[in-house]
Amino acid sequence: MSQQRRRGVRDVPGALARGRARVAGVAKRRFPSVAVTGMTGVGKSELVDHMTGRARPEGVPDAGSAVVERRVRRGRLLRGFRFRVVPGVNAATRLGGLDEVFHDAPVDGVLHVVANGYATGRRPAGTTGAVVVSREDQLAAELEDWTVTAHRIASMAVRRERPTWLVVVVTKVDLFDEPVEDVVTRYSPGSGTEFGNRLDELRALAGAAKLSVDVLPVCSHLEKGSAVSRSQRDAYLAALEARMAQLSGHV
């Protein structure tokens, strides 16, 4: 066998590896992974249901005990998103889920969901009766949840070569008794609020060039008599999807 032919045979494994890497790169660009984080009751799973245009299949649980990769959405040129919903309960499974999406298998972007103190109260396992939770308690829990999540986002953003994007999704806007724009401003960097200050701290830790931050309102569920119309709800979701597409290089 000639030296040139032997060299060609030896190069086959390397060529195959390079081919697999190119295919994986294309797949990652077409289907970027997105962590969906936030405390329990803010509507993470419901948001993913609406964004994928599909109801949750029977037997598929909420993200209550582990990270759930719920959907792959195919759109133009087979592009879409892999949503990875992290448990919202403040327990070891939630912390493990955060480590999974931000350290073990880092995601391309983050949807961090907040509800302006209107998260649905959840009863502890094995208990019954109505759940009464004040907005003040919910807002405090929301801020605590964000603090834990933000540190992991900063750590991931620093390690990555490519910039990371974050969208703070303000849900349940149909329940607000004040202008949605004012609420969005309070959750924004530079707002001077507690949440805004911690966003500023996150950007300082990660580096502004390494982490982009957007804040967008959303309404996933419409109660009877809701102040938000179906067309408004769809417009909120469309704006979120359009921004995610821009951040992921889909447009």
Image (cartoon, rainbow, N blue to C red):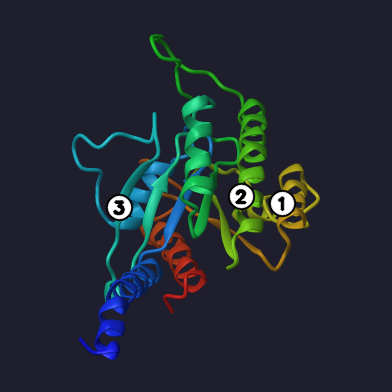
Residue 73 locus on image (x, y percent): 29, 61
Q: Are marks 3 and 2 in contact (CB under 8 Å)?
A: no
Q: Are marks 1 and 3 in contact (CB under 8 Å)?
A: no
17 or 148: nearer the eye?
17
Residue 177 locus on image (x, y percent): 60, 43
Residue 181 is at least partly visible in this image: no
- Please give the residue where the numbered disc 2 appears in the rendered image: 153
Residue 105 locus on image (x, y percent): 46, 50
Cα distance in 3D space between marks 2 and 1? 8 Å
Quarter of the view holding residue 85: top left
Indicate the quadrant containing the C terminus: top left, top right, bottom left or bottom right.
bottom left
Task: Tell me the residue at 58%/68% (across/down).
Answer: 162
Q: Are marks 2 and 1 in contact (CB under 8 Å)?
A: yes
* Residue type, numbered disc 2: Ile
Residue 217 locus on image (x, y percent): 54, 55
Indicate the quadrant containing the N terminus: top left, top right, bottom left or bottom right.
bottom left
Task: Tell me the residue at 54%/35% (across/down).
Answer: 118
219 or 97: nearer the eye?
97
- Please give the residue where the numbered disc 3 appears in the rendered image: 71
Query: As displayed, is residue 90 above or below residue 125?
Result: below
- Please give the residue where the numbered disc 1 appears in the rendered image: 202
Counting other residues with Cα less than 10 Å from the Cα at mark 3, is it few (<14), some (14-19), or many (20 or more)?
some
* Residue type, numbered disc 3: Arg
